[in-house]
Image: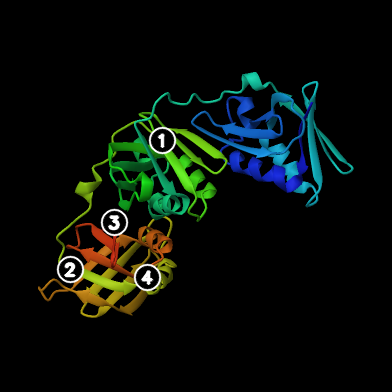
Amino acid sequence: MQFIKANRDAVLKPLQVVAGIVERRHTLPILANILITKNGENVSFLATDVEIQIQTTASLSTGAEQGATTVQAKKLIDILKALPDGVEVSVAVNNKKAAITAGKSRFALQTLGADEFPTMTIAESFNASFTLPQKKLKHLFHMVHFAMAQQDIRYYLNGLLLVTDGQAVKVVATDGHRLAFCETQLEGDDASPMPRHDVIIPRKTVLELQRLLVDTDEPVQIDVASNQIRLRFGEVEMVSKLVEGKFPDYQRVIPSGYKRYVRVPRDVLAASLNRASILTTDKFKGVRLTLSPSTLKVQTNNAEQEEAIDELEVDYHDGGDGKGLEIGFNVSYLLDVLANLKSDDVQIDLGDANTSALLTVPGDDSFRYVVMPMRI
């Protein structure tokens, strides 16, 4: 039975949409495969790792037949990538083998039965549903994703907190040393107030969404259940399990009332920190910031007695006490946030050498970044 007959690029595009979550090593061999379902001219591709599922559909076939099979994702994509641009590709399945033909090239791949493929069960009802433009949702994830923990024993930190509250949609990520917060408001027809819901989206789901979302006004339909989130945009549907657990109270972590602050051009600060970071090591990423009227000194030392000093002209407000401030930070935590911001300037609000710093964008209340100090 012929499943696909279409241009190589037309086949490769939907395959690459779903294949990002396929694990190369898995206890279930079939999870290395993609489920291909033909329904007349429409062909759907579905991949899952049991925690996340992505499905997309394209018009890639002819005839009215219906059928389903599974083929190893990596081999199929590698074959398509190796074929010439614009060549027509056909995929037919007979006797548990997928025959791939393109020009004078022929390949035969093993298949596994579609009835063995472990598709996820979609929640019967959702507690919250709302719509955001793709570029707005991508922006929210972009502003906080770098602060998510990686393989932390506190599993609830290995993801991103999504909060719906009235007309506000908020996202928060923290690894225990720094915290990033960003929010947006619902607009247009979907601006009716929502009840408050807090859910934790797994790290892998967030990173995959960043890959798939594009900077357009096309809508993303987001449905949130107690243990599952579903996102639909274009021809793509993603379903993901949620992380169980209680996320830290981010509102208590974000400081307020600081009187000291410094404003500095973002690219100037990033360049200075990059220079200073050359002398840091993998084990010790400390950088010392010394603030005095109109000057910020960036300084690092390492175990080899080497030193880097960089001085910047800045707009520093000492809060009226006439004193400067010396404080240490992990340089990576500062560089991460500066690399993801697009603003010309940043403002850093400070208490003392032992309290966390608050980094914001002047004139933009939607983003906040908190970083703990370190002893140097």
Q: CA distance from mark 4 to mark 2?
A: 18 Å
Residue 154 visible in the picture: no
The residue depicted at 24 percent of the width and 80 percent of the height is: 294
The residue depicted at 49 percent of the width and 45 percent of the height is: 209
Residue position marked by numbered label 1 in the rendering: 223
Please determine whether, in this image, residue 251 is positioned above or below residue 22. Answer: below
Q: Nearer the viewer, mark 2 or mark 1?
A: 1
The kind of secondary structure element at disc 4 is: helix
Q: Quadrant of residue 3?
A: top right
Residue position marked by numbered label 3 in the rendering: 371
Amino acid type of the residue tagged 4 in the rendering: Arg
Q: Position of residue 354 (x, y in %)?
A: 19, 58
Amino acid type of the residue tagged 3 in the rendering: Val
Amino acid type of the residue tagged 2 in the rendering: Arg
Q: CA distance from mark 4 to mark 3?
A: 16 Å
Q: Residue 266 shows which numbered tag?
A: 4
Q: Residue 213 or 49: which is nearer the viewer? A: 213
The quadrant of the image that shows the C terminus is bottom left
Residue position marked by numbered label 2 in the rendering: 260
Badge 4 or badge 2: first in the primary sequence: 2
Badge 1 or badge 4: first in the primary sequence: 1
The kind of secondary structure element at disc 1 is: strand
Q: Residue 158 or 355: which is nearer the viewer? A: 158
The kind of secondary structure element at disc 2 is: strand
Q: Residue 250 or 333: which is nearer the viewer? A: 250
Circle 4: is it few (<14), some (14-19), or many (20+) Cα within 10 Å?
some
Amino acid type of the residue tagged 1 in the rendering: Asp
Badge 1 or badge 3: first in the primary sequence: 1
User: Do tag 4 and tag 2 residues touch (Cβ < 8 Å)?
Assistant: no
The residue depicted at 61 percent of the width and 23 percent of the height is: 117
Q: CA distance from mark 1 to mark 4?
A: 36 Å
